[in-house]
């Protein structure tokens, strides 16, 4: 396993939609080794998720994992999840404002409207089909990662640019209020 360099905003790789993987590609030793690198890079950076194109691989694959994450103390835990060729279907028209940050957009946060409930369809790292619904903050995390695979960053979805702030100012001025909103979502959806 190896840590990969993370592309940052401005790098064209982040704006290119990724390509679908075949089962044969997915199951190859090269891709399986890449998945290990992707997970190691995400964990090393304390990310809640990371997409393949964030580490210069333009394929439709991402990893998610939240376990008492110090960058996101209000996020519910998500077991290590690998999504290959994911699609998201909005299950509810209801949205919530999610304060998001990104490993590819260092030291910036902003409010992004996200669907409160979604359905995710994908393959796992073995090529088995996964199909599940998720809601609340966890749904926001999945939407953020799949956006990456479509060449979108959270800053593209910020509706009110006055919500943009550095991490330090988020913690100083906005974290308490957002944490209360986040707790209400978690209480409502359990995720």
Image: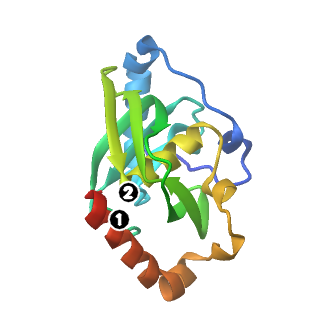
| Residue 185, numbered label | 1
On screen, residue 185 versus residue 95, left or right, reads: left
Extreme residue in the top direction: 24
- Residue at (55%, 29%) from the top-left corner? 59
Disc 2: which residue: 136
Q: Dot 1: what SS?
A: helix
Residue 144, horizontal then vertical, whole percent: 51, 50
Where is residue 115? Give x, y as percent.
49, 51
| Residue name at image x 52 percent, y 54 percent | 114
Location of residue 8 by image quarter: bottom right
Write down the quadrant of residue 181 in the picture: bottom left
Sequence order check: which comes first, mark 2 or mark 1?
A: 2
Question: Between 167 and 116, which is closer to the camera in this rendering?
Answer: 116
For this rendering, which residue is in front, 1 or 53? 53
Residue at the front extreme, as displayed: 93
Q: Nearer the viewer, residue 6 or 53?
A: 53
- Disc assigned to residue 33: none
Which residue is painted at 53% across and 63% down in the image? 101
Give above or below for 23 relative to 171.
above
Task: Give how far apart the Cα atoms at labels 2 and 1 are.
Answer: 6 Å
Question: Label 1 neighbourhood size at 10 Å, few (<14), some (14-19), many (20+)?
Answer: some
Q: Position of residue 4 (x, y in %)?
A: 50, 45
Please name the residue shown 38% across and 70% down the image.
182
Local crowd at mark 2 within 10 Å, few (<14), some, or many (≥20)? Answer: many
Give the farthest residue toward the bottom: 172
From where the camera sits, is residue 69 visible?
Answer: no
**Circle 2 — which element?**
helix
> Which part of the image, by quadrant, shows the C terminus?
bottom left
Query: Relative to 58, is 162 on the left or the right?
Result: right
Residue 119 in the image, given as x and y percentages of width and height: 40, 37
């Amino acid at each position: 396993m190896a840590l990969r360099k993370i592309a940052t905003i401005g790098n064209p790789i982040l704006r290119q939609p990724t390509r679908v993987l075949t089962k044969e590609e997915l199951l190859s030793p090269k891709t399986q080794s890449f998945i290990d690198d992707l997970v190691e890079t995400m964990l090393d950076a304390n990310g809640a998720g990371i997409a393949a194109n964030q580490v210069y691989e333009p394929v439709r694959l991402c990893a998610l994992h939240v376990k008492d994450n110090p960058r996101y103390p209000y996020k519910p835990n998500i077991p290590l999840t690998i999504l290959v060729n994911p699609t998201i279907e909005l299950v509810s028209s209801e949205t919530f404002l999610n304060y998001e940050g990104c490993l590819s957009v260092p030291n910036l946060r902003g409010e992004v409207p996200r669907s409160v409930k979604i359905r995710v369809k994908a393959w796992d790292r073995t090529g088995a089909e996964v199909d599940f619904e998720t809601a609340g903050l966890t749904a926001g995390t999945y939407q953020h990662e799949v956006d990456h695979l479509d060449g979108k960053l959270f800053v593209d979805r910020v509706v009110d640019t006055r919500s943009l702030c550095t991490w330090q100012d988020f913690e100083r001025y906005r974290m308490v209020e957002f944490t209360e909103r986040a707790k209400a979502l978690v209480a409502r959806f359990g995720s």
